[in-house]
Amino acid sequence: MASSAAAAPPTGGRDTRTQLFVGNLPYRVRWQDLKDLFRRAGTVLRADVALGPDNRSRGHGTVLLATQDDAERAVALFQGWAWQGRVLEVRKDRAGVGGAGAGVDSVSVLDTAKSRTF
């Protein structure tokens, strides 16, 4: 995955970081674009876009947000968001913080499409 700098877990206290899976990304989107978009929801610690062996986007990625509240706000804002001609699928990443990511759910992204655009 192409990514921003790694975000270390907080020292002491409870880890509130929450990672989201973002599916159906436009193929020309890079990690910085994803990070810039998700900043609208809160503090983004890391954004990754999965790349194939040919170094081209696989159309999905992950975003690590500082708090669960930021992540919930991001899901509310961007699930079904139309971005560069594609409708995003945004959900909590099943692999968790620092995981390898997960596949796309069997639920159709288009079933939850909203007519919001970026």
Image (cartoon, rainbow, N blue to C red):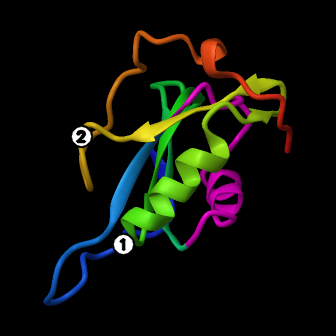
The residue that mark 2 highlights is 95
Give the number of the mark in front: 1 or 2: 2
Q: Is residue 46 visible?
A: no
| 3D distance between C-alphas at marks 1 and 2 | 16 Å
Identified by mark 2, the residue type is Ala
Question: Which residue sits furthest left?
Answer: 12
Which quarter of the rendering shows the C terminus? top right
The residue positioned 59% from the left and 30% from the top of the image is 57
Q: Image height check: is 106 above or below 26?
A: above
The type of residue carrying mark 1 is: Ala
Looking at the figure, which quarter contains the N terminus? top left
Q: Above or below — where is 91 with respect to 41?
A: above
Q: Residue 47: x percent and y percent?
A: 51, 56
Residue 40 image position (x, y, % from top left): 69, 64
Mark 1 lies on residue: 7
Q: Viewer-proximal residue, 93 or 28? A: 93
> Of label 1 and label 2, which has the lower sequence position?
1
Q: Secondary structure under badge 1?
A: loop
Q: Is residue 63 rendered to the left or right of residue 101?
A: right
For the point 29% across and 71% down, the residue is 16
| 114 lies left or right of 79 | right
Q: Based on the displayed image, in which of its 4 quarters is residue 110 positioned?
A: top right
Label 1 Cα neighbours within 10 Å, binned few <14 / some 14-19 / many ≥20: some
Query: In terms of secondary structure, where does tag 2 sit?
Result: loop
At which x and y percent is residue 109?
Answer: 59, 18
Mark 2 crowd level (few <14, some 14–19, many ≥20, 10 Å Cα): some
- The part of the chain drawn in magenta is 22-42
